[in-house]
Image: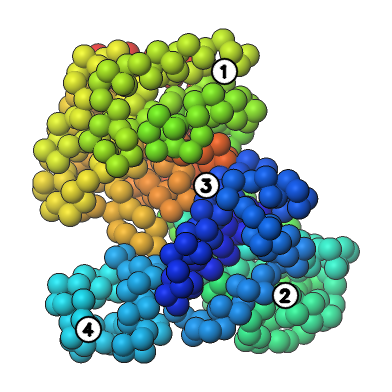
Amino acid sequence: MDNRQIAQVFGQIADLLEIKGENAFRTRAYRTAADTINAWGDAVARLDDTQLRELPGIGKDLAAKIRELADTGVCRYHQELLREFPPTILDLLRLQGVGPKTVALLYTTLNIRSVDELAAAARAGQLREIKGMGAKKEALILKAVDERQKDAGRHLLPDTASMSAEVVSYLRERAPAVEFIPVGSLRRGCETCGDLDILAVGGDASLMDLFITHPKVEQVLAHGDTKSSVRLLGGYQADLRLVPPASRGAAMQYFTGSKAHNIVLRDRAIQRGFKLNEYGLFRVDDESKVCGETEEGIYEALGLGWVEPELRENRGEIEAAVERRLPRLVSTTDLRGDLHMHTTATDGRDGLEAMAAAAYRLGHSYIAVTDHSKALAMANGLDEPRALAHAARIRALNGRFDGLTLLAGIECDILPDGRLDLADDCLAQLDIVVASVHSHFSQDEAEMTDRILKALESPWVDVLGHPTGRLLLKRDGVRLNVEQVVTAAAAHGVALEINCQVDRLDLNDAHARLARERGVRLVISTDAHSVTALGNQRWGVSMARRAWATLDDVLNTRTVEDVRAKLRRARR
Ligand code: DGT
Ligand code: CA
Ligand code: CA
Ligand code: ZN
């Protein structure tokens, strides 16, 4: 189990304890432990008992639970708590503005156990009758329910990737001769995934028995010789499909999807007198097999170049594959640096030197340290004198890590009226300014668009940070005319960020593609608040690839000299 997964179990224990109304001290202990584990640089599963107890906030009891999770993949205490409640109760916590206390209230007063039941009660006007809720809260809950209904049962890409890796490694260990390949939306790098799709190549029906007895299986939904489906603890659904090696490529192609891409491909096959399915490409006249072993073979037989999984959405990739003008997509190894991160100077968990050292270990050749500005008081944001003093400390570290350049920056708040939070003469003395919205998310589209357009007029804004402010599975982005923002960014030479925080991935694929096509440069930034989070670039790269971005479209694939020369401030 990786740190995220262990942290997630502890987070759920904390939620469940809070729903139960247990004392705040115990709840907090689990939450603190979850934060610690999440931010820890090495895999805590590999630590021994003594090392575990040296982690801040981890005592004997929590160390034992980490050990249990590492050894067995589950924690009995967690499972006992889960059994005390209906399995759907944790879904309620995903609603914006609904915390454990509200869930407890809803459960004890109206026996509300799922989002559907909550929606029904809210529509019937029952929530306003509960002491401590009222009509306003009822309306907010209804809005949150509507926003989230479309995401029901979906999970973040990194969480899906961890869960998939866990199931796959379990299967690989026990069936080493079989090849297991994650497919579906996970392989396409989608920001959220509905379920896990795993392909098994080679092997026999006994694989299915192995699959359905995984320790995390909560319910077996289907159990056949070549296909099984299960519900896993934590609300994931997983499908395993078995195909013979001769069908490997056809099955990968079919089960990677997307459905829209597959439909076009199948039509193309039909037009050419073929039949395409998960077993191969066949001639219609004599039913002979044309190919099936490799994906490349399938695409080639249909007159197409091989299409990267991230592009398979029927958004023009088939046409491009016909004309052999598919882009060479940017990859994680193309990135040379990271242009957005925080330290303990504001709300980061790790200090400046620790962040620099970690970036150095990752092989970055530059980083920009961009702590918050003063408007973000709860994050201890920097005012002008503190920002400049911090910049001096950042620059003083240059030379300390061989080949790593530190740029002194700031993540400057865009105030509600579009002014910047720090004075121009301060911003002018920094190497890079990321400007972001962190407040007044409810402005209407015209206000929010004007606000950002005004900020983009400042000659000192180099990058617009997490442009829409969305939180995946939690909060929709602000109301914003993205097209106008993209146009302005192009006109002013401001880069747009693809933020790699796992629940942001903001810009999304479609917006990033629009930006690219209008000649706006993208930056793929972790916005790391800890050493571990510096490793999150791959998730932003997934969005960039889904946006058809090449190395040239992304600013932080360049050398530091090139980055500096291309920043907006260099060209004023
Ligand atoms: P998800 O699970 O909602 O995140 O999205 P996917 O794309 O993983 O969808 P899923 O799990 O329902 O199916 C996996 C792949 O299997 C899908 O991308 C394409 C293929 N597939 C499923 N159903 C159909 C279908 O009815 N027709 C075709 N052509 N392909 C399908
Ligand atoms: Ca899927
Ligand atoms: Ca599926
Ligand atoms: Zn921010």
Mark 3 — residue?
539
Residue sitting at 16 percent across and 46 percent down?
Answer: 448
Left or right: 547 in relation to 211: left
**Residue sitting nearer the eye, 18 or 563:** 18
Within-10-Å neighbours for mark 2: few <14, some 14–19, many 20+: some
**Image x and y of residue 559, in percent:** 52, 18
**Secondary structure of residue under mark 4:** loop
* Quarter of the rendered structure image containing ligand 4: top left
Mark 2 against mark 4, which lies toward the viewer? 4
Quadrant occupied by the C terminus? top left
User: Does the CB distance between marks 3 and 4 fall below 8 Å?
Assistant: no
For marks 1 and 3, the one nearer the N-term is 1
Residue sitting at 50 percent across and 29 percent down?
Answer: 351
Mark 2 — residue?
215
Mark 3 vs ligand 1: CB below 8 Å:
no
Give the answer, above or below, for where 236 lies relative to 554.
below
Q: Is residue 330 visible?
A: no
Mark 3 against mark 4, which lies toward the viewer? 4
Left or right: 139 in relation to 1: left
Numbered circle sitting on residue 404: 1
For marks 1 and 2, the one nearer the N-term is 2
Mark 4 — residue?
130
The residue lying furthest to the right in this view is 177
